[in-house]
Amino acid sequence: MSALAWLGGLAWFAWDWFRANLRSRPPPGRTLEEAYRIGVQSLPVLLVISIFVGTNLALQGYKAFTPLGGQRLVGMFVAMAGVRELAPLIAAAMVAAKAGTEMASQIAVMRTREQIDALEVMAVNPYWFLVTPRLYGILLVMPALSLISVGVTVLASLLVSVFQLGLNAATFLEFARSSITMNDIFAGSVKAVIFAVIICFVSCYCGFVSEKGPEGVGRATNRAVVVSCITCVMFNTLVSQVLYG
Amino acid sequence: MDELEPPIRLVDVHKSFGSLTVLDGVSLDIPRGRTTAIIGPSGTGKSVMLKHIVGLIRPDRGEVRVFGTDMASAPESKVYEVRKRLGMLFQDGALFDSLSAGENIEFPLQRHHPELSASERRDRVEEALQMVELPGLYDRPTPALSGGQRKRVGLARAIITRPELVLFDEPNSGLDPITSDAIDALIGHLKETLGVTFLVITHDIVGTVNVADHIAMLYQGKLVAWGTRDEVTRSDHPIVRRFLGRNLILPDPGSAGSAVLPRIG
């Protein structure tokens, strides 16, 4: 299938979902269940990755600014790179890797085992039943996961800056605080919402159009994480260009 | 809908996938309140025909009318209304693995009968489990069910809403002969008990002869035989005789006898 045809299919998929939800409330109870599952699945790996990204940001910032005599700028560097760009992307990548792949593989298996056909025959719209709770669930947790990633990245950078690099904590925080505003936090949340929509639709669509059999399920899962990550990075650039370009 | 119109009417249905023609001008009326079997070799379009009937596939040409609604051209809401009046047993049951056996059966009730209380729904499920001879299996996790049990739970789900039409997609596929016989007997029993229209897609000839009132045979996308069970088993069509004759001793064309199972040993 060509990339253009695939994108066209994704657009139709989103349109079908929209039509299915025009006059329907989300399946009761399942949105919170999905939000909990996505959050619990993604949080541990998100914390680990955010810690190590934070430590490396501090180290690289220190190396870059020391020859210029600007060690104090490490806090600013961490805040700008971490808060504006990396933390939302880390959250997106981890959610795509954990929750997105699960969405794709679950739905692909349902496709293979005729369970999606069974939903249709039982007069239950599968877009409404399978996609809606996942979308609302991911929308609920993604901004929170992005904010947690921001906090952990900055905290890890601060600890490395203070205990390993010998920088002053108050100076680090002062420079960090002065370089970011509430608008940056808001922009990060907007990015998180956009990433949530991308991950959910791409992953669910990959599952819906999966070929039958274990190979089809594997390909759907793989495609879900690859396409989600690439699309999130592209949209991240687009939003950053609009806000900071 | 015209009360005289059969619950399922196919009119000159054509369907191709690329260069492969799967249905080639099939016209057929499925009679109300009877059991009709669609037989034919694998890959001859039986399951594709079934998917047309439930509106999962649209024909390239022709009409598929279910309860008077053309499933290809009707708006989605109308198609869903038609689907609420039918039940379907899928080849592998198509049960949801995250639900227990009983929850699977309860699923369509939860969606379409909000007027029922939880205890009423539970009673209906227990009753359906009794009908498929699986009493007390409500809490059994779906992955722990055997192949035959999956079919029975799928069958219970198909009939739980008391539909006017029940469709069976290869009810015997993947089952050993003893379980297969038990499923045939169950379908025969339900046919007597429920008195609704059954449509069975199968290549299991022995089971078909046991339960069907009418038989249609598809071969290379065309309907090559259609009639009552005796009419079809007495057909002189060479493909029909070759297909049925592998498993049955057929009467001479035009004779008054019926097909019988071959004696073993």
Image (cartoon, coloured by chain):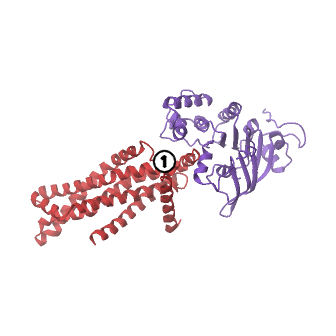
**Chain ID of residue with mark 1:** A
Q: Taking B132 as reference, is A135 above or below it?
A: below
Q: Taking B207 as reference, is B237 above or below it?
A: below
Query: Badge 1 is on which residue?
Result: A129
Quick check: B196 left or right of A230?
Answer: right
Closer to the camera in the image, A71 or B168:
B168
Work out which quarter of the rendered image holds the C terminus of chain A and state it.
Answer: bottom left
Q: Which quadrant of the structure image shows residue B214? A: top right
* Residue A43 can be seen, yes or no: yes
Closer to the camera in the image, A157 or A179:
A179
Q: Which quadrant of the structure image shows residue A241? A: bottom left
Instruction: List x then y, in percent, for residue A47.
Output: 27, 51
Chain given the colour red: A
Q: Residue at x 16, y 61 (%)?
A: A177
Identify the hue of chain B. purple
Closer to the camera in the image, B101 or B176:
B101
Instruction: List x then y, in percent, for residue A92.
Output: 34, 57
